[in-house]
Image: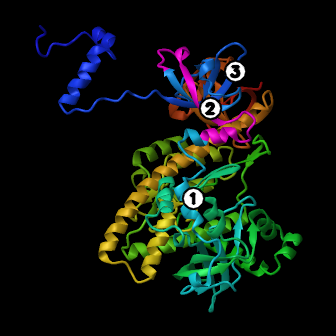
């Protein structure tokens, strides 16, 4: 007889798992009121299926943490064909990478389906472009036209010169702008935002789904929307020539760019034009005659807006707002979803103009509601961690740069001064990137903690309720206040909703960023797979013990492995972010320019390998 407390042999315990003894243990748990432990589900992975004649199917997962290959027996293919993107569930736990076996439980996209890889990425992140039948049904109950009854009590701006400026391929327009000269000098800027909260009712199915999604995610040629398309591209979108309900902010600004005051109110507008960033930039930067003639009735307003943008930008720079000038990728796909161009996205006059107008509108709204101590959702960016800033000072010291601020009490103006000093330098993009990584990440909060990067005491997101839930909730709170105020007990409930929305929206924003980066890396790898053997100039953008990363002018980044540096034995010097040759003293350091050749690309793993061209 076994003495109480004596251990059983682990070998015997393993041998009897799932047999009579296991069933007796489960029965015993049930009798003692302890729930049975459910069997741990076998993991699932998304990947690309390849079929070899006469052999098993092989799925190569996209997830780096998955087995490198999963064998699929003929009976477990589930009707999938070679080249399909599939969801596979492991049927055999693996002791080694070669042991993985599974069965296909879902075909996500067929081999010849354009954009199938993006669909697979969306699915891998647990997302869907589609909405449930109940959510779609609620969206269909929303009318397609604005009625005069809905306009009652709103300020009627349908006769004003109000218009949108967006990308050429944009389909959801949630902000429109207007400008007029202010009596006595200066400007009155109008920012008019789609009144999504009029259609998405509190605690309804649309509202709960929007909170769950948190944000729309833009993936090159498609969108994972926060709201059904019938709303986001329909009644909520500020389409040209159509009546739309809006929440407006009129901001009075003096000739020096200082804000004198603002007014928030409910309105109805009819956009006079759907303008495009490139067209308006050509007009404002170069005086393009064709665009000047095309937009002759709006020309004075556009020129006035351009002057106002310059004033606001100077005001922002004067208070120390950090102006990152990071290169962002613009990836062009053909009709089959194949990347045909990777280039640096343009950030021209018209883009900057709308950015400045949205920034100042967000600031004004946040200040009013923070000072009024209303429940609210703020966009916050906290001061950088002192230890990370100390490391950053060491890093920039390698470039002969200094930072004129105490790491424990960093000032945004000091960082902005640094970034201005490196404009045009070969290492500009590297220092910009490391600066950004050394700072805290922006997030949402029910507390007004300020925005370090913008050097603002008050800031929120108000201008994109079609694609961001915090903006939608902010609108709902503003409208309730405008319509008679918010009672004390209601404030408590709204604060709880604001806290929940801030937490959820911060989570979904991070997920969206990860998905966008995943798709971008995959498409960059696919693009470079068509350019193997070609040579490019590159700048070293990262250094590690296994090699260094090099960035091309088009934002593509690849790895030069240490084992390809055969002219010497290179030692990693982390303190100075460089590799040093043991015999010849040659160095590869951050910001150095190198000539590389594209050597190998693994699209599924999003890996691009370069070798030095000598």
Placement of 350 over or under 64, stated as above or below: below
Element type where label 3 sits in the image: strand
Magenta residue check for 527: no
Q: Where is residue 247 in the image (x, y as percent from the top left)?
A: 55, 76
Report the front residue among 526 and 33.
33
Q: Distance between the residues labelled 2 and 1?
A: 27 Å
How many numbered dots are placed on residues in this image?
3
Placement of 94 over or under 492, stated as above or below: above
Mark 3 or mark 1: name the one nearer the start of the chain. Answer: 3
71 left or right of 275 in image: left
Element type where label 1 sits in the image: helix
Q: Position of residue 18 (x, y in %)?
A: 34, 17
Q: Position of residue 539 (x, y in %)?
A: 69, 38
Q: Which residue sits at x=52%, y=67%? A: 200
Return the residue at label 1: 136
Return the residue at label 2: 86
| Residue 405 seen in the figure | no
Q: Which residue sits at x=57%, y=63%? A: 139
Badge 1 density bin: few <14, some 14–19, many ≥20, Cα 10 Å: some
Return the residue at label 3: 51
Give the magenta range.
92-121
Instruction: Farthest residue to the bottom: give it.
Output: 184
């Amino acid at each position: 007889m076994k003495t109480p407390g004596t251990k059983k042999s682990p070998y015997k315990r393993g041998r009897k798992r799932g047999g009579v003894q296991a069933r007796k243990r489960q029965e015993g748990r049930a009798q003692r009121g302890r729930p049975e432990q459910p069997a741990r589900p076998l993991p699932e992975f998304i990947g690309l299926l390849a079929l070899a004649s006469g052999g098993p199917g092989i799925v190569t997962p996209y997830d780096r943490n998955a087995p490198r290959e999963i064998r699929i027996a003929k009976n477990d293919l589930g009707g999938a064909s070679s080249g399909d993107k599939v969801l596979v569930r492991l049927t055999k736990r693996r002791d080694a990478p070669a042991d993985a076996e599974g069965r296909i439980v879902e075909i996500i996209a067929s081999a010849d389906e354009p954009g199938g890889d993006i669909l697979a990425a969306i699915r891998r992140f647990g997302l869907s472009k589609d909405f449930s039948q109940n959510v779609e049904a609620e969206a269909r109950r929303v009318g397609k036209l604005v009625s005069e009854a809905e306009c009652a009590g709103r300020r009627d701006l349908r006769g004003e010169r109000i218009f949108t400026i967006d990308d050429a391929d944009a389909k959801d327009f949630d902000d429109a702008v207007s400008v007029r000269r202010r009596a006595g000098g200066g400007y009155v800027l109008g920012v008019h935002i789609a009144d999504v909260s009029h259609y998405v009712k509190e605690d309804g199915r649309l509202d709960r789904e929007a909170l769950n999604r948190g944000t729309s995610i833009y993936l090159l040629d498609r969108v994972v929307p926060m709201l059904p398309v019938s709303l986001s591209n329909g009644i909520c979108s500020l389409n040209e020539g159509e009546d739309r309900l809006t929440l407006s902010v009129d901001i009075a600004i003096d000739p020096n760019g200082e804000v004198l005051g603002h007014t928030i109110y409910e309105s109805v507008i009819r956009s006079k034009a759907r303008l495009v960033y490139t067209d308006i930039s050509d007009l404002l930067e170069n005086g393009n005659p064709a665009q000047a003639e095309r937009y002759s009735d709006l020309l004075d307003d556009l020129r006035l807006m351009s002057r106002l943008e310059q004033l606001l930008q100077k005001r922002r720079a004067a208070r120390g707002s950090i102006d990152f000038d990071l290169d962002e990728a613009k990836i062009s796909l053909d009709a089959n979803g194949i990347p045909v161009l990777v280039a640096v996205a343009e950030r021209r006059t018209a883009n900057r103009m709308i950015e400045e107008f949205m920034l100042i509108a967000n600031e004004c709204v946040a200040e009013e509601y923070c000072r009024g101590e209303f429940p609210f959702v703020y966009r916050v960016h906290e001061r950088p961690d002192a230890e990370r800033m100390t490391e950053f000072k060491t890093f920039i010291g390698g470039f002969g740069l200094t930072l004129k601020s105490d790491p424990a009490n960093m000032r945004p103006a000091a960082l902005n001064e640094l970034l201005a000093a490196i404009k045009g330098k070969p290492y500009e993009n590297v220092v910009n990137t490391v600066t950004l990584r050394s700072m805290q990440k922006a997030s949402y909060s029910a507390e007004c903690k300020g925005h370090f990067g913008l050097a603002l005491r008050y800031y929120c997101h108000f201008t994109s309720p079609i694609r961001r839930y915090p903006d939608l909730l902010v609108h709902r709170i503003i409208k309730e206040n405008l319509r008679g105020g918010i009672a004390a007990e209601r404030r408590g409930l709204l604060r709880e909703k604001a806290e929940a929305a801030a937490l959820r929206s911060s989570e979904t924003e991070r997920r969206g960023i990860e998905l966008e980066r995943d798709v971008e890396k995959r498409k960059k790898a696919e693009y470079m797979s068509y350019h193997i053997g070609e040579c490019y100039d590159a700048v070293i953008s990262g250094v590690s013990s296994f090699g260094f990363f090099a960035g091309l002018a088009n934002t593509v980044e690849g790895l030069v492995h240490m084992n390809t540096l055969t002219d010497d034995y290179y030692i990693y010097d982390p303190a100075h972010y460089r590799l040093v040759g043991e015999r010849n003293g040659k160095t590869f350091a951050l910001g150095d320019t190198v000539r590389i050749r594209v050597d190998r690309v693994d699209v599924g793993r999003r890996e691009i390998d370069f070798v030095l061209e000598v």
